[in-house]
Amino acid sequence: MAQGKQAKVLSEPQTKTALRYIFDQSRYPERDQVILLLSAKAGLRAKEIAGLTWSMITDAEGEIGTTIELPNSASKGKGGGRTIPLNKDLRQALVTYRPKAEIKPGGFVLTTERASGFSAGSIAMWFQRLYGALGFDGCSSHSGRRTFITKAAKAVAQVGGSLRDVQQLAGHASLQTTQRYVEGDSEAKRKLVNLI
């Protein structure tokens, strides 16, 4: 992908603004918070958000678990399935949303008034409407995913991990693909050059 063509990474203030907007403007704030956080805190693609079922996020007792168990069939490619630990904010949003959700055995986590689930295209349009309403130019359904991958890449060394861990969380077949998602940091580059 050429530089400038990728979806923009969300800043922390932009993520907070989007969450506030959802709670102030949405008819379904609990559901819509989950949609945003699945993108920004779990790095899911629009297809993966749309295809998420309750069985992928619940434990043996039927409670919200501690991971997302995403099978290959719900992801991209033959090997995109993966296990993603649930971020604490995302887990809490799922716990809050669950009593308001229409739950059917094997059913989708996210539903609409008219359908038992979203399509990948309708999730992409949901993000387009949200970011358009907020004036976040250059943001799309992939912005949360890029945000997740960039933040993970910057923090992975602090927890003793490597870029390979980020690649696995993202569900990328190639480390090169993961590297293309990571946005550089001008301040970090300046500090790095001054250390040389």
Image (cartoon, rainbow, N blue to C red):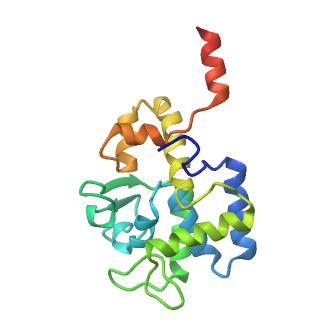
Of residues 29 and 120, the one nearer the viewer is: 120
Quarter holding residue 183 = top right
Q: Residue farthest to the bottom?
A: 114
How far across and how far down the image is residue 173, in percent?
30, 46
Looking at the image, residue 73 sits to the left or right of residue 98; the answer is left
Of residues 92 and 192, the one nearer the viewer is: 192
| Placement of 30 over or under 42, stated as above or below | below
Of residues 100 and 117, the one nearer the viewer is: 117
Looking at the image, residue 164 sits to the left or right of residue 94; the answer is left
Residue at horizontal 46 percent and vertical 40 percent from the top? 180
Residue at horizontal 58 percent and vertical 72 percent from the top? 126
How far across and how far down the image is residue 160, in percent?
42, 29
Residue at horizontal 60 percent and vertical 17 percent from the top? 192
How far across and how far down the image is residue 196, in percent?
58, 8
How far across and how far down the image is residue 119, in percent?
44, 76
Q: Residue farthest to the left?
A: 78
* Residue 171 at least partly seen: yes
Residue at horizontal 59 percent and vertical 67 percent from the top? 127
| Placement of 181 over or under 35, stated as above or below | above
Looking at the image, residue 20 sits to the left or right of residue 146; the answer is right
| Placement of 138 over or under 102, stated as above or below | above
* Residue 96 at least partly seen: no
